Amino acid sequence: MNQLKKSLFVLFIILYAAACNADFIKVTLLGTGSPRPSIDRYGPSVLVEVGGKHLLFDSGRGVVQRLKQLEVSLSDIHHVFLTHLHSDHISALDDVWLTGWIYQRPSPLNVYGPKGTKSYVENLKQAYAFDVQLRNQYSGLDLNAGVMTTSEIEPGVIYSENGIRVTAFLVNHKPVDPAYGYRIDFGKRSVVISGDTTYSQSLVDHTLGVDLLVHEIMSVKSKILEKNPRLQKIQHYHTSPEQLAKVLEKTKPRAAVMTHVIVIGNSEDDVLQQVTDHYAGDVYMGHDLMSIELGNNIKVIPY
Ligand SMILES: [Zn+2]
Ligand SMILES: [Zn+2]
């Protein structure tokens, strides 16, 4: 009898561990750069693999090449969430759409984004109408597989499927307004992606206690910043290391990773140091193709 109890207990522990691990999200930084061209940091884009889905957040320069490096098929990308309409975040949406179509995405590409997304997508369709028609007539590519739908979103839950929930919330990237951050929930696991923002109370409210915060960063050496009004304006709608430390101190995610890295005059090590001087938790400088696995434990995997 004792043996039976022991076996049942072991079985319970195994099943419990399996159930906990079922709540699993993998986040990969496809591009950690900004508008400034860089061979190491491609345009902003984050891949979230969750519940059998591949969700793409922003579609910056080089996203298709990064997906290829991961051996993720474009035909598996069905949902793209745009944080805002600055060109660095959307400039490769056409590549995801059309190259995915050439590789026969079996159903439409659904694009979610702020007001203005519809116009952007409709204009893309117009710009590529010649190519789409030609590929359909000459190569026989199915027009139905090349459909791109658009949802202009409001704050709140904007996607819900298979236990996955994506919530959009406003951030402060003024004068770019609206600009969104996204929170992804799946079982016990959660991720917040900041998009572009300066310190934002709404982001703090949505990030409290999450597993992972993917947050933008901008750091300019003070001597350079003082003399450059244009950089001051740009810094004004991005997040300094001190501001990021304040966000982290208030929200205490299990881990945080910096992306959309703009560093001028300082080194990236300086930036990390500036954050960790004010915050004792786990925080990392993000790099292209770095993955973060969120399960019972958090695993950060450099490429
Ligand atoms: Zn940006
Ligand atoms: Zn921006």
Image: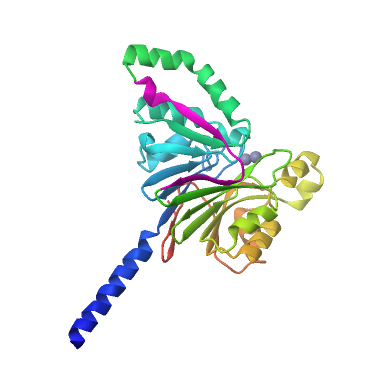
Please tell me whether residue 143 belongs to the stretch shown in magenta. yes
Please tell me whether residue 134 belongs to the stretch shown in magenta. no
Position of residue 102 relative to residue 189, above or below, is above
Instruction: Give the magenta range.
Output: 142-161
Residue 236 in sight in this render: yes
Q: Report the residue at 53% width, 17% height from top.
A: 126
Residue 37 in sight in this render: no
Q: Dividing the image into four equal quarters, which quarter contains ligand 1?
A: top right
Q: Report the residue at 79% width, 42% height from top.
A: 228
Q: How many marks?
A: 0
Position of residue 206 relative to residue 2, above or below, is above
Front-lying residue, 79 or 225:
79
Residue 248 at x, y = what percent?
A: 63, 62
Looking at the rendered image, the quarter that the N terminus falls into is bottom left
Residue 179 at x, y = what percent?
A: 65, 41
Residue 167 at x, y = what percent?
A: 55, 49
What residue occupies the far bottom of the structure in this picture? 2
Front-lying residue, 221 or 157:
157
Q: With 190 as the anchor, is 169 left or right in this view? A: right
Q: Report the residue at 28% width, 71% height from top.
A: 14
Q: Report the residue at 47% width, 34% height from top.
A: 110
Residue 291 at x, y = what percent?
A: 44, 53
